[in-house]
Amino acid sequence: MDFELEMAFFVGGSNKLGEPISIDEAQNHIFGFVIMNDWSARDIQKWEYIPLGPFTAKNLGTSISPWVVTTFALEPFLVDNYPQDPEPFPYLKHSDRFNYDIKLQVDITQGSNVSTTVCRSNYKYLYWTPKQQLAHHTITGCNVNPGDLMGSGTISGDSSDSFGSMLELCWKGTKPVSLLDGSQRKFLQDGDTVTMKAFCEGDGYVLGFGTCTGTLLPANPMK
């Protein structure tokens, strides 16, 4: 079992079936953001990845934070979009900034109640913007509705302590991650609590998303 550090946005407004949302209008359909943990079963994922791609390994559970932070509230924290090379197709190109300086953190707590921060990352490392994601999702006419949730994918930076999953942090199980209680992890264990935090720092204030927390319980074998 593994976590994946992600952010996600809620769709606001809708489009008719068969009518794509253009890149120039995409921001009008993005209501706000939450932290998202895309729980992942890596052993199942390895088995089904070829030829199907991840399916049951990824749909077993999703946790989100309690607060939806609107795009309006995030405007003071806009930063330049991540450089893209090669250039995206014309329907995905936009010059306006739609990337954010959101600090991210993942803690793991085991029975001793000692928490270890295993990841510090930032939303600004995402290669694709939410506008591009929504425009691409609807380019063939897929309709979206208010309340639809779209995850960002794993948010990993360029340093080893900024990787957004145990799969990356332990380098596919070859480099165990040490916790402050003296134990080590290659992947999550029963009883582990994963807490994700996200916040923006302004001049004299902090804008937070709350925490995205979940505890891994022992499997309930089928009778």
Image (cartoon, helix red, strand yellow):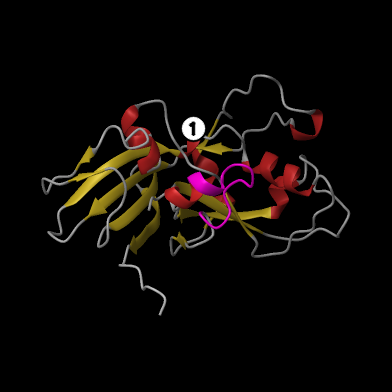
Q: Residue at x 83, y 48 (%)?
A: 20
Residue on which the image places disc 1 = 125
Q: Could you tell me which residue is drawn at 38 percent across and 53 percent down? A: 1
Quarter of the image for residue 49 reads top right
Residue extending farthest to the bottom is 223
| Image point (79%, 58%), residue name | 143
Residue 18 placement (x, y as % from top left): 88, 54
Quadrant of residue 148 within the rendered picture: bottom right
Residue 122: image location, x then y, percent: 42, 37
Q: Secondary structure at mark 1?
A: helix
In the rendered view, does 223 fall on the left or right side of 147? Answer: left
In the displayed structure, would residue 92 be above or below residue 154?
above
Instruction: Give whichever of 34, 55 is nearer the camera.
Output: 55
Residue 49 in the magenta stretch? The answer is yes
**Residue at the top extreme, as displayed:** 86
| Majority SS type along the magenta span | loop
- Magenta stretch: includes residue 196: no
Q: Residue furthest right?
A: 18
The amino acid pointed to by label 1 is Tyr
Instruction: Using a 10 Å C-alpha cutoff, classify the residue at mark 1 as few (fewer than 14 neighbours), some (14 to 19) or many (20 or more).
Output: some
Is residue 39 shown left or right of residue 26? left
Magenta stretch bounds: 46-57
| Residue nearest the viewer, comparing 25 with 57 | 57
Instruction: State whether residue 202 appears in this view.
Output: no
Where is 56 relative to 24, above or below? below
Compared to 16, does 88 lie above or below? above
Observer able to see residue 98: yes
